[in-house]
Image (tube, helix red, strand yellow):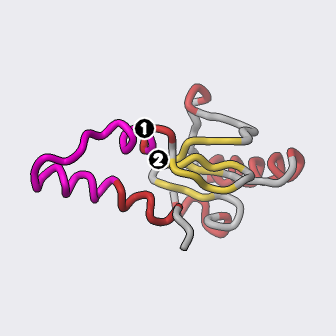
């Protein structure tokens, strides 16, 4: 995907494995960016499965995070997993708790 997107990578298109996010501030800008990405896909003879595509979303769940114009927040599944977790009863469970809790560090100010 990095080769296919070339100069568009991390400027107007953000790839992760076989996913690509194309953020924009306006519909017009989104259409321009989408056209550029689709032209690159055509150059490399790539096709899309339309049922796996989403266009013009104001909020998406991506890699366990909720991404919107307000910013990035932890995804609901991660929050639910932490809040529903029982108190650790052994070393293995403490490690599991710390692993999950450390995910939230980047979302805590201070």
Q: Is residue 101 above or below residue 77?
A: below
94 in the magenta segment: yes
> Which residue has dot 2 on it?
64
Question: Where, quadrant-wise, is the C terminus in this rendering?
Answer: bottom right
Question: Judging from the image, what secondary structure is the residue with disc 1 in?
Answer: helix
- Please identify the quarter of the rendering in which residue 36 is found: bottom right
The circle drawn on residue 40 is: none
Q: Main secondary structure of the magenta part?
A: helix
* Mark 2 or mark 1: whose residue is earlier in sequence: 2
Looking at the image, residue 64 lies above or below residue 54 = below
Disc 2 is placed on an element classified as loop
State the image coordinates of residue 40 (x, y, percent, origin top left). 66, 54
Q: Position of residue 1 (x, y in %)?
A: 51, 56
Q: Which residues are magenta?
A: 79-100
- Rendered residue at 52%/64% (across/down): 108
Q: State left or right for residue 54 relative to residue 101.
A: right
- Return the x and y of residue 50 as percentages of the image width and height: 61, 29
Q: Nearer the viewer, residue 24 or 83?
A: 83
Residue placed at 22% from the left, 52% from the top?
Answer: 96
Q: Which residue is mark 1?
A: 80
Is 39 covered by the magenta stretch?
no
Q: Count numbered badges in the picture.
A: 2
């Amino acid at each position: 995907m990095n080769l296919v997107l070339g100069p568009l990578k991390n400027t107007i298109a953000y790839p992760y494995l076989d996913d690509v996010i194309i953020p924009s501030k306006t519909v017009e800008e989104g259409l321009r960016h989408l056209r550029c990405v689709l032209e690159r896909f055509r150059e490399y003879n790539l096709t899309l499965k339309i049922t796996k595509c989403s266009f013009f979303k104001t909020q998406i769940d991506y890699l366990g995070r909720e991404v919107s114009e307000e910013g990035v927040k932890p995804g609901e599944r991660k929050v639910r997993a932490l809040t529903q977790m029982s108190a650790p009863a052994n070393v293995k469970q403490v490690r599991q708790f710390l692993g999950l809790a450390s995910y939230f560090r980047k979302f805590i100010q201070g």
